[in-house]
Amino acid sequence: MAGVVASVLVVGLVAVYLRLNGNIDRIDVSDMLGDDRPTAAGNVATGPLNILLVGSDAREGEGNEGYGSGDWEPGQHSDTNLLMHISADRSSVTVVSIPRDSMVPAPVDCDASAPEAQWQVRQWNQNFNTGGPGCLIRTIEGNTDIFVNHFAVVDFGGFKDMVNALGGVPVCTPIAIDDPKAKLTLSAGRHRLDGEQALGYVRTRYTVGDGSDIGRIKRQQAFMSSVAQEATRSSLLLRPDRLLRFLDAATQSLTTDPDFGIGEMREVAESVKGIGVDKIQFVTVPTEPYAPDANRVQWAPSAATLWEAIRTDRDLGAPSPTPSPTDTRPLTVTPDRIAVQVVNASGTIGLAKQAVASLLAQGFANPTSVNSDVPATGVTVEYSGQGLESARTVAAAFPGAVVKSATTDLGGVVRVTLGAGAPDVVAVPNRLGTGPLPAPTVSATPSPSQIETRTADEDICS
């Protein structure tokens, strides 16, 4: 009898696995990601994981009707954009909300071969409309140097089904909500919302607060905190019937990359099962006004601190590490034989000229400076042709700099791009002259205090 029961159980588990795995739609976007992606820091078993989660505003398909035709601009947009970072030691999760109205450099026509120097600034959610999740990943990686391991896209109908499978989710609103566009009416106070109401709550925008996407993101983060608390409170993982109902609802609405199926999801879930809600934090990419359009925003310089923490798997509350020299091998080209152009892409006025003065003091041959309208992070040193050894000497002046071959001919010039978070210039080992370097008067290092976080265990009314 025991053998019969075990056999039935195994067959049942296989059937459930096949059913859930078959629910998921898959898209291979590898040909849209380019051949210059950041280096992956690990996989499900080892190293940190970065998973892009996208909420699509598709108006077609079961459960998606009745939210406007989308005729104003056909296709789907990424209404919600989340980059979930799971730490390498599986002790914490950071969920980064990327405002849909962010104006960020992106590949022209989502062409994977378009060099970053030729990218054009456009609204964030246009990337999904133009090129789907592949274009979003390409844009994230190009602007942050963070490798995205997997992606998952869910639509309106799937979101509602998942909330219903949980038995509803509690929310708390300090003011009454009456938003016809979001199809939601709520009095002030606490409520338990079903799927339809929850979708309206996370979408409501224009009739609450200042009507901004940033305000909506704060409500979405409070909602996600409530979901985490509810799943923990109801012991979802210990109730096979509820878990199966939730997973069935979730997988029927998911679109993922080919390598992110039920098996991989199970491994991820297994690896983070010991993380408490107090170790799940939500953060929004810091933004500032975008001068050409008051209805849009751009990433603030302090965003560099956030991306650096994700990239290096560092807790946001921990101090930034001191940059180490890029290369410790002996330098073979002296500064007086190198032409350098310093590009200021940090948003800090005077940073490039300050760097030029420090390079001049070390004997570099008449370095020049220019400003860039395209924001960057850290320091990038580019060379063309046979200029690698010259680039290594220049990079020695900027601890932590990334050295790479330029996509265009620089005519023998080594180009240094200073982004937010760029370090002060230091003396290179083979410098000329012995005089001190000019004392820095400006700094590109953003203030970590500008980044606000919310943990999943916080009161949903806060």
Image (cartoon, rainbow, N blue to C red):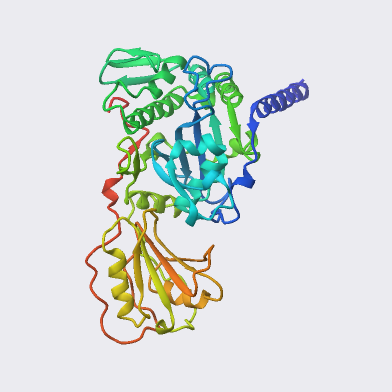
Give the side of residue 219 with respect to residue 381, left or right. Answer: left
Q: Which quadrant holds residue 263? A: top right
Is residue 76 or residue 177 the one in the foreground? 76
Q: Is residue 176 above or below residue 209?
A: above
- Looking at the picture, how far across and down is residue 36, in whole percent? 57, 56
> Residue, x 40% and y 68% (percent of image)?
324
The percent position of residue 425, horizontal first and vertical second, equals: 33, 71
State the quadrant of the N terminus: top right
The image quarter in which residue 227 lies: top left
Q: Is 70 on the left or on the right of 370, as rendered?
A: right
Q: Residue furthest bottom?
A: 433
| 30 versus 182 height, above or below | below
Q: Can residue 44 be seen in this snapshot?
A: yes
Count the labels in the image: 0
Q: Position of residue 31 (x, y in %)?
A: 64, 47
419 left or right, relative to 37? left
Q: Quadrant of the C terminus?
A: top left
Q: Nearer the viewer, residue 377 or 71?
A: 71
Task: Please provide percent x and percent y for residue 366.
Answer: 35, 78
The answer to whether residue 194 shows anywhere in this view is no
